[in-house]
Amino acid sequence: MAIFGITKGSQSSVYIPGLKAKMDDRMGGGRQQPWWEWPSLADPMYRDWNTPETLVKLREKSEALDYFVSRFSQMREVGQLLIDEACSTS
């Protein structure tokens, strides 16, 4: 299963205020878990890599690469400021 996410330092770490809400709003999200600041499943086409359809998509041209690069770039764009601020104050 492919999951995009921002992990915490540990289960007992404090969450970055507002990060999950901002990421959920701009990128969708999943339920809160102790070890994730923000989790989100990959789109259904790329979620389960153990299907013939997904393996074909991964092999074809750069469609899969473009998808993952786009999602990682969007994660950075949306969350970078809040993460940088949290890290500089800790």
Image: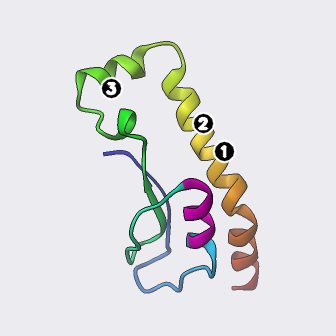
Amino acid at the residue labelled 1: Ser
Q: Helix or strand or loop: what does disc 1 sit on?
A: helix
Q: Residues within 10 Å of mark 1 (few under 14, many from 20)?
A: few
Q: Is residue 25 magenta?
A: yes
> Which residue lies at the image location 74% right of the left edge and 85% below the top edge?
89
How many angstroms separate mark 3 from mark 1 (CA)? 22 Å
Say whether marks 2 and 1 touch (CB < 8 Å): yes
- Secondary-structure class at tag 3: helix
The N terminus lies in quadrant:
top left
Q: Which residue is mark 1?
A: 73
Quarter of the rendering containing residue 90: bottom right
Q: How was the colour assigned to the protein in this rendering?
A: rainbow
Q: Earlier in the sequence, mark 3 or mark 1?
A: 3
Q: Are marks 3 and 1 in contact (CB under 8 Å)?
A: no
Label 3, label 2: how far apart the Cα atoms are = 17 Å
Magenta region, residue range: 21-27
User: Which residue carries the number 3 mark?
Assistant: 54
